[in-house]
Every structure is written in structure tokens, then in C-alpha cells.
Amino acid sequence: MTDLLARRLLFVTGKGGVGKTTVAAALGLLAAEQGKRTLVCEVEPKGDLSAAYECGPTPFKGREVGPGLTAMSMDTEASLREYLRLIARVPVVGRIGPVATAFDFVATAAPGIREILTVGKLCYEVRERHYDLVVVDASATGQVIGQLAAPSGINELVRVGLIRSQTDWMIEILADPAVTGAVIVTTPEEMPVSEAVDLAGRLGRETAVRLACVVANRVLPELFGHREEEVFERLCGRSEKAAVAKQLGVSVEAVSSVFAAARLAVTIRRDGAGHLEQLRAGIGEEVPLVYLPYLFGRAYGLRAIRQVAESLGEEL
Amino acid sequence: MSAPTAHDPAALEQLVAAKEVIVACGSGGVGKTTTAAALAAAVAARLGGRVLVLTVDPAKRLADALGLKGIGNEATRIPTSSFEAAGVKPKGELYAAMLDMSESWDALVRRHAPDARTAGQILANPLYRNISRRFSQGQDYIAMERLYELHEEGSYDLLVVDTPPSRNALDLLDAPARMQDFFSSRLLHWLTVPYRSRLVNLASKPFYQVADRVLGSQLLQDVADFFILFQTMREGFVARASAVDRLLHDLRTTFLLVTTLEAVPGREALEMKAALSERRLHLGLLVCNRVLPSTLTDPSSHEAAEALSAGAGELAELLSRQGAGELPADVTARVIEEVAGSFSNFRQVATRESELARELSSAHGVTVSVPYQPGHVADLSGLLQMGGTIWGEPGRSPRRRRS
Ligand SMILES: Nc1ncnc2c1ncn2[C@@H]1O[C@H](COP(=O)(O)OP(=O)(O)OP(=O)(O)O)[C@@H](O)[C@H]1O
Ligand SMILES: Nc1ncnc2c1ncn2[C@@H]1O[C@H](COP(=O)(O)OP(=O)(O)OP(=O)(O)O)[C@@H](O)[C@H]1O
Ligand SMILES: [Mg+2]
Ligand SMILES: [Mg+2]
């Protein structure tokens, strides 16, 4: 349906906890299964990616987690070191520690320094064609705009210096919609949806990266169609429940609990559907919107990632 | 759910009556803001006094419910008539305010800068906007700082403060200490030694050469200028940060930990609990929010669901015969199967939740479970209802326990 995986660089973002890591890990798996050499990079090195793939630590230099699939975690100090060595060709003697700390400190004040080291590394992997596809488990809404806008934004602050002279090729990669795309993950809830809509707008206004796709994660199944709903309402009547209980030889309370649970499921689903309508209205008709089912069983680890990858495969 | 034991409804009242500050914390999206507002509303309605809830980025519907329009640090009163419209005669007064990050930072700079001119220079510095938005833990610090200020003002009997969605909930607790560290760090010192002498001392150092080459000396200069200005506020900031820290540790302050019973927030809540006790901060109330009904884990309901699933076809035939054509057998069978299947799906989730609830609720003050509330808190009446659940309104909420 979409040509999402035909791109070379995908930033997966969204509100905290919506399923960014899950979706990024699943996209990586899917791409690798399609024969692409794939890198999945976790920008916030929390170890969630290694938990998703149930592998050991995923260092900056990468770890092979499957055929054609490499996982890594971002580390701005390591990125700085690589940058100095490969691009700036600055001879770094001895420990880089103090330099990195100082950079860290300067980066606290100057926008874009840390971000450029993050985005720079990712663009570098794309440019060097080490991989066919780089999937980024990116930062949440708050930080991601700063990261994606860094190569263009940094020009305002850094007037001279090597960093400045290195941004053009990054912008070229980021701004090409055939190469780079953002994937916003959300859930059918109020705040995640309003953040997603907000983020979609800001991506367009403040960064060169185009929105490639929105993923609504944790969508509950629809229990009933219209006719079923009518029948369900009738079944919830007192005499019907009593008849059911009698026939099954269980208590009316127990039957009521089971029916009440279904009603709750319907209500949560309906609340969610309302939020998804807001989502659709907010992002516009032209952006592909993909739904991923709620996983009732264990929703983390490789098995869950495989399940999500499968759903994604069907939808994409 | 793990069998909830009955709890003493006076426990929460006693806790709230003894405290002046309640800090709501927990991981992102669990319902901190909603819970803080609901608790404040319940206290204003039931216990009385002047109660203020300080919210951070409330959802639009909640902001509307509290009459919060736009941004700004002004507190607004929720009129008694709104309570009465919701069928409640409040004993006290409820106020709400929204934390305005940039306005709070500006106020802080004005307070701590040695003179108006320096304040003006800092506020106009291009790096300042960026720092005030992004300084790590800046948001957390501002929330705690605003709390301190309101507490000092002393115009409220109870302050319920909401906290920003941190990437790491623990950052909140350490924000004042980090602010102090920041000002005493060697790097700040280095960056703020007069530029000329730094050039002399450091131009020969490899770091400077690298930094200069990569970043450009102009940027280094800008950053240094900014920190030199910033440094002038050091004394005020450090004194203030330690006062904020003292308030958090004060006997009159307690923490309200909000969580859902999903895996990630639950794990973070457990960590938060440990961190609070490690730092000797008082955890008075744990709210498990959006929990599924306890009947989902009842063995008898499970048995009924299994029986429904096994006997769906037969049952549908029977009902359709009795139902005078309104219950067509095929549709009815489908509905029964869906109902049973959905029960077993949600039962899986509820079983995980109840295990987590058990782990979380051990060994501390009051634990309250707030059920998932469909079409949630669109108005004050919804807030009051949730507040009632937390408060332990008789007959409304059987799912409370105290350990
Ligand atoms: N489809 C799903 N059904 C049920 N649970 C899910 C689903 N997708 C993700 N989850 C669960 O939601 C939680 C958050 O997922 P994940 O870690 O992928 O989110 P995230 O956006 O990366 O979070 P963070 O912002 O903390 O990095 C995890 O516990 C995960 O198991
Ligand atoms: N008991 C509940 N039942 C159903 N929905 C709820 C419940 N409590 C809160 N919500 C909803 O969950 C969403 C998140 O709530 P809220 O904004 O209070 O969370 P938060 O922890 O403050 O989030 P953030 O970390 O983003 O500040 C809101 O849409 C709110 O209406
Ligand atoms: Mg993640
Ligand atoms: Mg909030």
C-alpha cells in the first residue's frame, strides 16, 4: 500500500510510551526479511531495543541481531569521535573524555550540537551505503523536531567551523522525500493523538523531513457490527441474562460480569475510534494511516515484535 | 485483582489534612494531571480550605473543565456555581493554575540577576531561550520552584502540584540538586573565566584547538558570554534550589505516585517508589489509574465465559426460540462468542495488572485504584466523580486498600 520501506532513512517518533521502539524494531525486522541490509538505531540509549530483540547490548558500533539486521544505540561522544576522525580529520590524541564533556556542556546551551552528532551519524550511514535502510527509534515529540531541524538550524548559530561546513549533504538526504521519511506512532487516546497531529504540523513547518506514514498502535478489535450490537443490547436484558445463566448453570452475576467486560471493551474501542477520527482529520487524507492491533498477550520481546512486523507487513 | 482489603476511609482525609503540599509524580501519560486535579477538587469539596492545583500542560478538555484559558501563571478560581451545577456543595475553594515554563524562567532570572540591566541582557541573549526550554531537568526544576514560591506566598491551605512528563521520572526528585551542581561545575567555571585569560591559558590546549576548529570560536565566545551572565545569578539560584529541596523533604509535603498497571509505567512506578524512599521523601498516596474491573479476574466469571464460549451455538438456538425473532440464532451465536473471547483477552491483561498492583501496593500509605472511566473527565462533574473514587466515597469505590 505504501512504499515506506523503499526509503533509506526512517525516523520513528511519537509521544512517550506509544510504541516507537516496538514499531521501529518491527520495521527493521520486516525490511531485513525482505532482503534489505537494515540498521535499527535507538537514539535514547535506554536498552529498549536490545530488550525488543532479546539480544545483548546494542553498542554504537552495532550488533548483528539477525540475518541482514544490525542494531545500535546512539552515543554522541562516540559519534563525535567518529566525526573527528572520519570527517573533520582532526587528530585526536589521547582521551576524548574532556572534549566530550565540554561539548556536552556547550551543547546544553547551543542548539543543534548534540542533535547534529546524532543526525549526522545516521545520515552518514545512509550516505556511505553501509545499509539499504536505516530505521531510527527516534526521540519523543519534544526532542525530535530539534534533531531533524538541526542541520539547517545550526547555521544560525555556528557561523564558522567545520560543523557548519558539513551540513549541506545532510540536508540533501533529509529533505529528499524519496530517501527520508518520518513515521509518527500514536495510540487511539486523547493526548497521543493530539501530540501526533501537532507533531505532523511541526514536521512540515520546522523541518525538511516529510511525514511518510502514521501508525495507530494498540487498536482494539471491533467486537460487533451494527446487527451484533443490537443483539448484544438485547442479551444484556435481565431476563436474557437469567436465561443464559440458567442454561449454563452459572450465576447471573458471573454472566453479568462477562457481559459488562464486553461493554467496557466496546466503550474503550468507541472512545478510541473518536480519537482516531480526530487523527485522520488532523493529518489529512493524503498521509497513509496504518493500524496495529492491541496485543493482549505478552507485548514485548522478539515474539511480540514478530507479531507487529507481520501486521505491518499486511498493512504496508 | 488481588483481593482488595477494605480500608479505613479516614486515612486519606487524615493524610491530606496533615499536609500542605502534594506532588503528583509518575511516568508520562498515566493520568498525573487528571489525578492531581481530581484530588484537589475532592479536597476542596469535602475537606474545605483554599486548594490550588498547579497543572502542567493539561489536556484541552481538562483545561476547559478547570476554566484555564491560554497560558500564564495566574491562578483562577473555579466558581462555587460550577460545583453546584455538578451537584456538589463545596466546603472550600478550588483554584487552578497552569505552569508557564518560559514565563517562570523569566521571573526567575529577574529575581536572581544582580540588577535589571543584567537581567535584560540575559533575557535578550539568543542562547537563553534555548537554554530555558531545553536545559536538562529545567522543566522539572521550574515546577518545583513554582511550588516553592506558591508555598512561600502562603495563600493556600493545600497545594497539589502536577509535574511535567519527564523522560525519567527520577529527574524530578533530583532537579534542585542538579541545579546546584550545575552552578558549581568546573566547566561552568572554565567557560566563565574572562575570555582573554582563557585564551592565553588554554589556546595551547588540544581541547581548545579541537573545539575551536569544529565549532568555531565565535560560538565558543557566545556560549562563554552567556555563561558569564548566567553566573551572576549563581548565589540566588543555589540558595533557592536548596530551599526547594528542603520543602520537598518537609514533613508537610507528601508525594502522590500515579501509575497505570501496564508494564512500562508499572516498572517505572516501582523504581520511583524505591527512589522516593532512598531520598527519604514521603510517599503518602499511590493511585493506580485506568485499572480494569476486578471481576475480570474472578474465577466464577472466567467459568461463565468458558461456558459461554463452549455453549454458544446451543445457547443461541435456545435464545432465538425464546426471543420472538429478535435474536437470530447465527448473529446471537457470533455475539456470544465475541463476548466470551473478549472477556478472555481482557482477563489476560487484568491478570497481569493485578500482579503488578500487588507488587506496588506493599508497604506504604494509602493505595487507591481508579477504574477506567469511559469518555473521561470532560467536565468538573467528571473530575469530582474521579475525586470521589480517590476519596473513597462510600458505596462508589469498593476497590481501595490500605496496607
Ligand atoms: N500493539 C501493542 N499492544 C499492546 N501493547 C503494546 C503494543 N505495542 C507496544 N506495546 C507496549 O507498550 C509499551 C511501550 O512500548 P514501546 O517501548 O515500544 O514504546 P516507546 O514509544 O518506544 O516508549 P518510550 O517513549 O518510553 O521509548 C511496551 O510495554 C509495549 O510492550
Ligand atoms: N481513569 C481514567 N479513565 C480513562 N481515561 C483517563 C483516566 N485518567 C486519565 N485519563 C485520560 O488519560 C489521558 C492522560 O491523562 P493526563 O493528561 O492526566 O496524564 P499525565 O500523566 O498528566 O500525562 P503527561 O505525562 O503527558 O503529562 C487523558 O486523555 C485523560 O483524560
Ligand atoms: Mg522507546
Ligand atoms: Mg500531565
Image (cartoon, coloured by chain):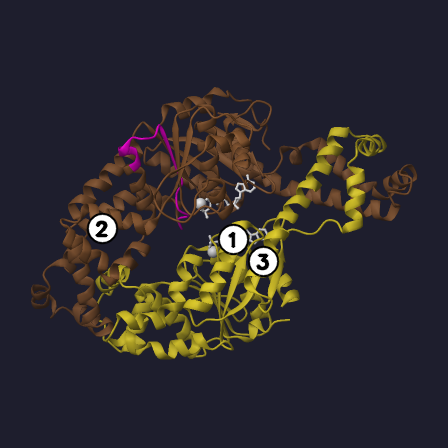
Counting from the top left corner in percent of width and height, residue A90 is at: 24, 76
The chain carrying label 1 is A
Question: Which chain is represented by yellow in the image?
Answer: A
* Real-space CA distance between mark 3 and mark 1, rounded to the nearest whole angstrom: 10 Å
Other residues around mark 2 within 10 Å, as few (<14) / some (14–19) / many (≥20)? some
Residue at 27% x, 43% y is B176
Q: Please check whether the numbered discs 3 and 1 fall on a single chain.
A: yes
* Real-space CA distance between mark 1 and mark 2, rounded to the nearest whole angstrom: 33 Å
Residue at 56% x, 75% y is A6
Residues in magenta, as a range: B150-167
Q: Amino acid at mark 2?
A: Phe
Q: Disc 3 on helix, strand or loop? A: strand
Q: Which mark is residue A216?
A: 3
Using the image as rendered, state which of residue A237 and residue B256 is in the foreground.
A237
Q: Is residue A212 magenta?
A: no
> Height in image: B244 above or below B10?
below
The answer to which quarter of the image holds residue B342 is top right
C-beta proximity under 8 Å, tags 3 and 2 = no
Counting from the top left corner in percent of width and height, residue B205 is at: 13, 68
Q: Is residue B105 visible?
A: yes
Q: Disc 2 on helix, strand or loop? A: helix
Which residue, given by chain and number where applicable, does mark 2 sit on? Answer: B182
Which quarter of the rendered picture does the C terminus of chain A lie within?
Answer: bottom right
Q: Amino acid at mark 1?
A: Pro
The chain carrying label 2 is B
